Amino acid sequence: MELDEIIKESLSTLGLNKLRTGLAVLGIIIGIGSVIALISLGQSGQKSVENQIESLGANLLTVMPGGVSSGAVRGAAGGGTTLTVADAKAIESSTQITTIMSVSPELQRRAQVVAGRNNTNTQIYGVYPQYAQIRKINTTSGIFLTERDLTSMSKVAVLGPAVVTDLFGEGANPVGESIRVNGQMLRVIGVVESKGGSGFANRDDIIYVPLTTAQKQLFGVDYVSSIAVEAKSQDVMTQAQDQIGYLLLERHNLSDPANADFSIFSQSDILSTASQITTTFTMILGGIAAISLLVGGIGIMNIMLVTVTERTREIGLRKALGAKKKVIIAQFLVEAIILTVTGGLIGMMVGIGISWVLSRVMSLPFAVSALSIALAIGVSGATGIIFGWYPARKAAGLQPIEALRYE
Amino acid sequence: MIKISNVSKIYKTDSVETVALSGISFEVKKGEYVAIMGPSGSGKSTLMHIIGALDSPSSGDYFLESQNIAKLTDDELADIRNRKIGFIFQAYNLLPRISALKNVMLPMAYAGVSKDERDKKARLMLAAVGLADRMFHRSNQLSGGQQQRVAIARGLVMNPAILLADEPTGNIASVQADEIMQIFDDINRQGHTIIMITHEADIAEHAKRIITLRDGKIVADKKNGSKRKHTR
């Protein structure tokens, strides 16, 4: 018996009990649909995170102080006080470093900020005016910090949109108003546009002040918490990283790179870490959805077992007329695969539809990968084979006399 | 052509052993028309299952066209049933949802006969049993007698060594039963070997030889020439 005949016969058998067939297929539609929708959603999320990180500057290197080494104990990166403005100036003016465009040392602290009756706890960033260019920051009103503000240690501040909302109310224009930080009055000269992010990574809940003002007037320190360096292009990132590394080792009188009291991250390092996290997240979502696929598969198995029992006499007759085991197995397996692959294809369309709607609602980029399509067809076919195998074997193993006698 | 040699069949259920056939031997030659009779429980159904290669004997040998088929695998038995045995069941056992033509084509599909050939042969067979005008009817749209005629066409379409009929008229009204028996007589006249299981004496009268079973043993095996012309 040819395969095309078996398929034709299976289709007409499945067509006889449309409600049952439909419900069995529905289980697979839901399973495959949710796997695809959730994986696409995860991938959209990943793309959105990548876009966000890239919008912060793809050519960016960040030099962080290493923790202070005391004996064998080494503090975490970012916790130290080993980087200074002098290091930043050395990087900028070094003749050995040929691959960089601009350098911006930063001092980051959290502080309580007061404006009139409102107050908030936010991040204070002491920065150079170049910071705006390196981090691609634009103002929506007023201006960013200037070279003059830096040299004259001006008591001025540029606010992030979230701070404006906290201190002056939604949509207010605070340019010209005053805020109080650590006992110092600062005049607001600008507001920057929203960058997104949330929680501790919120790039909108931020106040920029001149680095000199932050160090001397607000916090009384002479180190910086990081140095942002913009490389000339993405291709020279590694080279720039090495050049800066050697210069700083030399300046800090260190001979062994293993003892370095600083670390240099590129944006791509952060990007790959973030990608890893979102990939894991996508896998978890897909795994949860796979449970519903498993349930759908069990539904198929259940239906196939019922079918085998119902058609015991038919199977017995076919065996009496000379059907070999593999023909009977093929017949029931083909039915199961038709059910699951139909469900898989419909589920794929449903899944893509859902992820399209979700990406619209959540304003995420819409991503459907070839992977999810291959997954839908492959997994649903495999589900049919796995869950159809046992019922098909059961049918093929029936003894013709017993089966013919069955009422 | 058929040689049953010292065949026994014992069913074991838990601790109880039931002897269905105990050491039966007989031969059937090509072209014979044999009725196997006996009361229920005599072992005639078990014997039919063994002759039909639906079941294997517990001991003894069964030669069909000089091949010992007592110890073949399931798939080898399927092949024997497909090529050498044509079954006629009491309950017809047609597939209800497909046409008479498709039912007759089914054994040829399992034998790997080409589609054109299947169609041609099945049409010829249906015409031979007088159902040329019913080919495309689904079997559940046919009367009992018509269904059994489709089954006869299906049983003969592979040109088997034996046509094995189990109570072929058991479910059929008497007028139609006579038609069926008429067909059997014709088939036998054309040279086909027929083995028929029945408990009805007047049906058995159509056969040329009657074997009577009781308690798993042959108690009578005699020629039946005298009443050959008997009709109801």
Image (cartoon, rainbow, N blue to C red):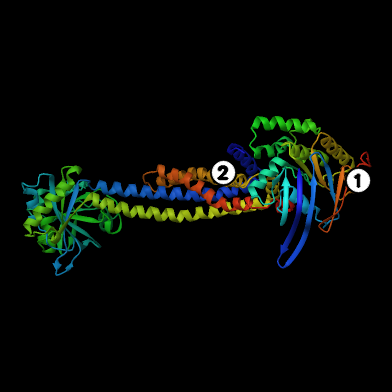
- Name the spot of residue B204 as percent of width and height, x first: 88, 46
The foreground one among A174 and B106 is: B106
Q: In this orientation, does residue A189 appear?
A: no
Q: Residue at x 73, y 45 (%)?
A: B64
Chain under numbered label 1: B
| Horizontal arrangement in the rendering, residue A78 relative to residue A89 (left or right) | right
Q: Quadrant of residue A252?
A: bottom left
Chain under numbered label 2: A
- Circle 1: residue type: Asp
Indicate which disc residue A338 carries: 2
Q: Are marks 2 and 1 on the same chain?
A: no
Q: Quadrant of residue B215?
A: bottom right
Query: Mark 2 or mark 1: which is in front?
Result: 1
Q: Residue at x 52, y 48 (%)?
A: A29
Q: In this orientation, does residue A191 appear?
A: yes
| Horizontal arrangement in the rendering, residue A132 relative to residue B165 (left or right) | left
- Asked if residue B96 is positioned above or below residue A214 in the image, the reply reads above
Label 2's element? helix
The foreground one among A370 and B40 is: B40
- Name the spot of residue A134 as percent of width and height, x first: 18, 47
Q: Locate the N terminus of chain B and report the quarter of the image it occupies.
A: top right
- Name the spot of residue B32 as percent of width and height, x first: 82, 41
Indicate which disc residue B202 carries: 1
